[in-house]
Image (cartoon, grey):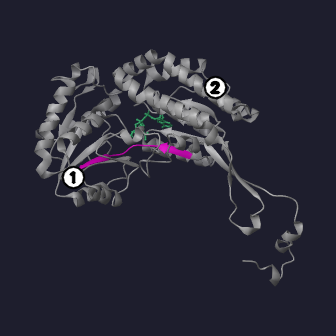
């Protein structure tokens, strides 16, 4: 059930009152809330799996490994590091005039924060950010994606039985509800989704000068160098591409590969797809569906607009079942209309033949900065050259997706692929205000004389 729009202002007001009551400043309270979130994930695991299965036909293995395990990992990290992360740090003054003073950086919660989730990983993208928000001591409004309706409904109904409703509220709804939320004043907005809505979020945030984290998408390239192990590259790229049927923000969007390697890559790919999903992937319980008719039509139109001789494998669709087969297309031009102008966000892998690495670099740089960049090579000089001459939110050499799972690495985009980052310590930092505090004594007032007017030449101190 969607949250009535007229209730939204009072939801935010109540959270602000709770924030000012100081309840979330208490570290034990934060720990207890994180423990409750952990309990929710563990006790309600089968319900959560069922919800995502209903939304995306996602296999239990993918739900647990990509939706639930990362949140549990983040909770464990916070519980282990909370004392250290939240501790006021003391820094050494750099100027002689402050030498006798105490300089500290207090790690304070920002206040009331809004987290807007996306549908493609409807649990992870909503509840991973809340771990950092709670750990840092904030009150939170959670807005699940209405597009993943089963998961949104389940979380809205059951999560409040676990988390303190004085400090965490779930607002369910679509555009009208999110629009009403965005009118309110928050102290941070954390949004995951497409860039067009990202601009709406940022414009709304600017009315209150609210800082934002935008986790967006883009066309993440996979570059295969001439020296790469092509079979291993195909194994890994296809896993990342067809995981969640291509509906992953950091899925490899397209492959740039030397002409001489194309045949090996395609031969290996056909074999891999059949091994993983069988002759008819529609019958495989390891293969997801497209989330909605709207997205189905958008992804299918990429196939419909291509010359059918370019479909190397796949291409079958079934709208009633929201099924689009794992599809590989070749040869594709780097500026191919439609397919190469926007994020595919579905199970189609374009293969673009290249002359050399310089051409790959030129192609990557001709497009918006991607969220991820993948490079397959055994040569350090090759990946360093590509990294030095391109930009991306993150990068992974000789694999896909895995850099985003590592808690020690910040996760986020750059420009059109996003701003800000999170995961592990970065999550805590994102939801924290570092309050610079200088503590002076009232003694030695005579030494201060030089800064007070009236000024004269003897007071010109460099
Ligand atoms: P979506 O449709 O679920 O939208 C995301 C959120 O925005 C939802 O909660 C929705 O209610 C809200 N929303 C939609 N329209 C709105 C409007 N007009 N005003 C205010 N709020 C609105 O998800 P999506 O945008 O289709 O997600 C897919 C995109 O997200 C892809 O581009 C993908 O790459 C990107 N993505 C990024 C990450 C990341 O971590 N960087 C993760 C997942 C998805």
Give the magenta part as a residue range.
212-225
- Mark before the other along the chain sequence, 2 or 1: 2
Residue 366 in view of the camera? no
Disc marking residue 137:
none
Q: Main secondary structure of the magenta part?
A: strand
- Where 31 falls versus 98 (above or below)? above
Disc marking residue 225:
1
Quarter location, residue 157: top right
Q: In the image, residue 15 lies at what x, y percent?
A: 68, 31
Residue 263 in view of the camera? yes
Q: Is residue 7 left or right of residue 459?
A: left
Task: From the viewer's side, name the closer residue of 136 and 316.
Answer: 136
Residue, disc 2: 32
Quarter location, residue 14: top right
Q: In the image, residue 268 lies at what x, y percent?
A: 14, 37
Q: In the image, residue 372 lies at what x, y percent?
A: 36, 46
């Amino acid at each position: 059930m969607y949250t009535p729009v007229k209730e939204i202002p009072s939801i935010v007001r109540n959270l602000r009152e709770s924030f000012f009551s100081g309840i979330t400043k208490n570290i034990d309270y934060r720990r207890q809330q994180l423990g409750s979130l952990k309990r929710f994930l563990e006790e309600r695991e089968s319900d959560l799996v069922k919800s995502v299965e209903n939304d995306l036909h996602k296999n239990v293995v993918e739900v647990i490994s990509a939706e639930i395990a990362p949140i549990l990992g983040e909770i464990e990290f916070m519980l282990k590091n909370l004392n250290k992360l939240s501790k006021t740090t003391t820094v050494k003054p750099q100027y002689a005039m402050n030498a006798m003073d105490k300089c500290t950086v207090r790690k304070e919660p920002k206040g009331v924060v809004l987290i807007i989730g996306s549908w493609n990983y409807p649990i992870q993208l909503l509840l991973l950010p809340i771990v950092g928000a709670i750990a840092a001591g904030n009150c939170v409004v959670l807005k699940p994606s209405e597009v993943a309706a089963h998961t949104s409904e389940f979380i809205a109904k059951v999560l409040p039985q676990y988390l303190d409703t004085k400090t965490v509220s779930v607002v369910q709804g679509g555009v009208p509800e999110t629009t009403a939320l965005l009118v309110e004043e928050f102290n941070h907005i954390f949004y995951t989704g497409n860039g067009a809505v990202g601009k709406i979020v940022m414009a709304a945030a600017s009315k209150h000068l609210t800082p934002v984290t935008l986790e967006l998408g883009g066309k993440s390239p996979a570059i295969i160098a001439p020296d790469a192990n092509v079979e291993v590259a195909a194994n890994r790229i296809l896993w990342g591409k067809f995981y969640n049927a291509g509906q992953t923000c950091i899925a490899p969007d397209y492959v740039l590969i030397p002409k001489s390697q194309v045949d090996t890559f395609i031969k290996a790919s056909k074999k891999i797809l059949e091994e993983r999903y069988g002759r008819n992937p529609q019958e495989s319980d390891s293969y997801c569906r497209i989330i909605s008719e709207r997205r189905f039509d958008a992804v299918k139109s990429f196939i419909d607009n291509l010359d059918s001789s370019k479909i190397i494998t796949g291409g079958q669709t079934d709208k009633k079942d929201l099924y689009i087969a794992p599809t590989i297309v070749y040869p594709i031009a780097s500026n191919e209309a439609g397919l190469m102008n926007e994020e595919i966000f579905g199970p189609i892998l374009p293969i673009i033949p290249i002359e050399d690495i310089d051409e790959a670099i030129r192609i990557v740089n001709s497009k918006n900065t991607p969220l991820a960049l993948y490079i397959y090579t055994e040569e350090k000089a090759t990946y360093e050259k590509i990294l030095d001459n391109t930009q991306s939110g993150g990068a992974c050499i000789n694999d896909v997706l895995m850099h985003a799972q590592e808690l020690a690495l910040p996760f986020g985009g750059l420009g059109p692929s996003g701003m800000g980052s999170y995961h592990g310590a970065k999550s805590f930092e994102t939801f924290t205000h570092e309050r610079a505090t200088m503590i002076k004594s009232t003694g030695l007032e005579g030494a201060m004389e030089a800064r007070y007017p009236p000024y004269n030449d003897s007071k010109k101190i460099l």
